[in-house]
Image (cartoon, rainbow, N blue to C red):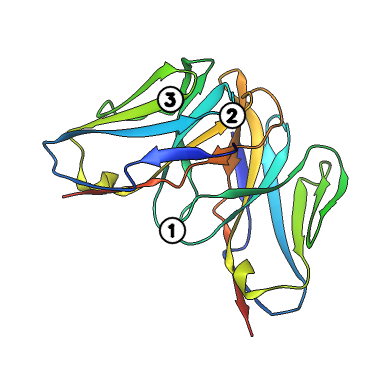
Amino acid sequence: DTEVTQTPKHLVMGMTNKKSLKCEQHMGHRAMYWYKQKAKKPPELMFVYSYEKLSINESVPSRFSPECPNSSLLNLHLHALQPEDSALYLCASSQDPGTGHEQYFGPGTRLTVT
Amino acid sequence: GQNIDQPTEMTATEGAIVQINCTYQTSGFNGLFWYQQHAGEAPTFLSYNVLDGLEEKGRFSSFLSRSKGYSYLLLKELQMKDSASYLCAVRGPSGGSYIPTFGRGTSLIVHP
């Protein structure tokens, strides 16, 4: 199984809503990532979890809150978002952040903030 | 940090060969990846180079020169389905780990 799954595929939320994005992998990978991607732009790193601990936070606003309940799951909790936060949110995993292994990406969640 | 440069867009003909270049500057190099991303889909891994030279994988090859801070992705026998964005990603130091940073991507358009 070389798949990273993400739910939901699409999400529309108001600026006062609270929602969560979910990501799951069963490849035994110990590094998991959240990226944000705007149209025609490269993925921008948001967070990195290494062995279930947050190792990198790329100065992301606190309205985005990551959580790693176990080695297979990664969540991104959303609260009080702005319309400019509308984007494709990609989850990825890799065997280990410190080695040369490639990242496996999920299909993404297309988020629209109204 | 890293500075990665690749052309914004390229066009090529079905059946032809195309070379997509990527130049980079980084404070500590630890490998270079190429990913393919179709519109609205997730990036998929194509190749990884950490030593100088050419890595061949079917119709796709990737080359690295660390001294020149340069890589290219070579696509042979182009097919219409190769129309996609091609992302160069360089691993460099970030907070004690080595995390890939993506270039802006090269949009390849293959026409009949």
Badge 3: chain ID: A
Label 2, label 1: how far apart the Cα atoms are:
24 Å
Drawn side of residue A8 relative to residue B14, left or right = left
On the image, the x and y values in percent for residue A75 come to 36, 27
The single residue placed furthest to the bottom in the displayed view is: B112
Chain identity of mark 1: B
Is residue A51 or residue B101 the one in the foreground?
A51
Q: Amino acid at mark 3?
A: Leu
Label at residue A23? none
Q: Secondary structure at mark 1?
A: loop
Both labels 3 and 1 in a single chain: no
> x, y (%) of residue A37?
42, 48
Residue plotted at (40% across, 57% down)? A39
**Along the polypeptide, which appears first: circle 2 or circle 3?**
2
Mark 2, residue position: A27
Q: Residue at point 76% right, 56% down?
A: B72
- Discs 2, 3 touching: Cβ within 8 Å: no
Residue A18, quarter of picture: top left
Task: Indicate the amino acid at tag 1.
Answer: Gly
